[in-house]
Each structure stands twice: as structure tokens, then as C-alpha cells.
Image: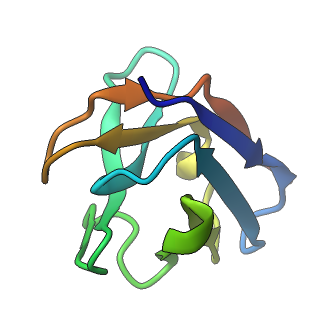
Amino acid sequence: QVQLVESGGGLAQPGGSLILSCAASRNIFSMGWYRQAPGKQRELVATITSGGNTNYADSVKGRFTISRHNAKNTVYLQMNSLKPEDTAVYYCSAGMSWGTNDYWGQGTQVTVSS
């Protein structure tokens, strides 16, 4: 079992920045972020493997950066140039292989509004 503890999020103005962090209770191959806006399905934001391979949703490419500190079992999501459509609950995920989501965090709210 892997526990994921998220931090960060909150309120930002359009064009602003926020950073999310997610600490895992042990090392795991793939970690990432998904988001779910009201009335919508949960969608991929970005994922990263322990080797540093990344995958981003087209909607966040060039604005969001995912990174990982393997020794701390922590993944970060730097979100820049935020837009109102980025408003959602952001969930940390972790998986034992590429593209799997075996574990989920509790979610953290990100609201982009003026």
C-alpha cells in the first residue's frame, strides 16, 4: 500500500502561478497529477516516471512542469500562466508501471479566478 499526501493548491489569479506537491510513503515507478472539474471526468494533467520520462496533457504543455525528487518520493507540479479553465480538484496518482493509477491522493482544490 502507498499513501499519498498532497499539499499546495488554493486560489490564484489568471496568469498567476501555483505549485502542488505530493509525497508518497515509498518509492513508486510512476507518479502524476490528474484533475476533475465540476461536471467533468477526471483527466490527465501530467505524469513522470522515476527515470524522468514525462507526459503532459496538450492543454497544459508549456505552462505546467512536473518534476520529481526520488530520494524524497515526492512529485511536484509547477503551474504557471494559470487560466480559469484550470480550476479543478487536482489528484495525485501513483502507479507501479507506466500509465497505471494504483493509488490516489485525497485531492486538492485549485481555483483560478480574478
Q: Where is residue 64 drawn, in percent x and y?
A: 50, 73
Residue 63 visible here? yes
Where 85 falls versus 13 (above or below)?
A: above
Say whether residue 60 is left or right of residue 22. left
Q: Which residue is more in the foreground, 102 or 106? A: 102
User: x, y percentage for residue 67?
Assistant: 49, 76
**Colour theme:** rainbow
Q: Residue at 40% across / 68% down in the picture?
A: 60
At 55% from the left and 50% from the top, the residue drawn is 86
The image shows residue 45 at horizontal and vertical percentages of 37, 54
Nearer-the-camera pick, 85 or 65: 65
Task: Single out the residue that lies furthest toward the bottom.
Answer: 62
The C terminus lies in quadrant: bottom right
Residue furthest top in the image: 39
Write the residue at 38% across / 53% down: 31
Picture layout, residue 3 above or below residue 63 = above
State which quarter of the image contains the N terminus. top left
Instruction: Please identify the quarter of the rendering in which residue 108 is found.
Output: top right
Q: Position of residue 72 (x, y in %)?
A: 62, 65
- Residue 111 visible in rendering: no
Q: Quadrant of residue 69?
A: bottom right
Residue 46 quadrant:
bottom left
Q: Is residue 10 left or right of residue 101?
A: right
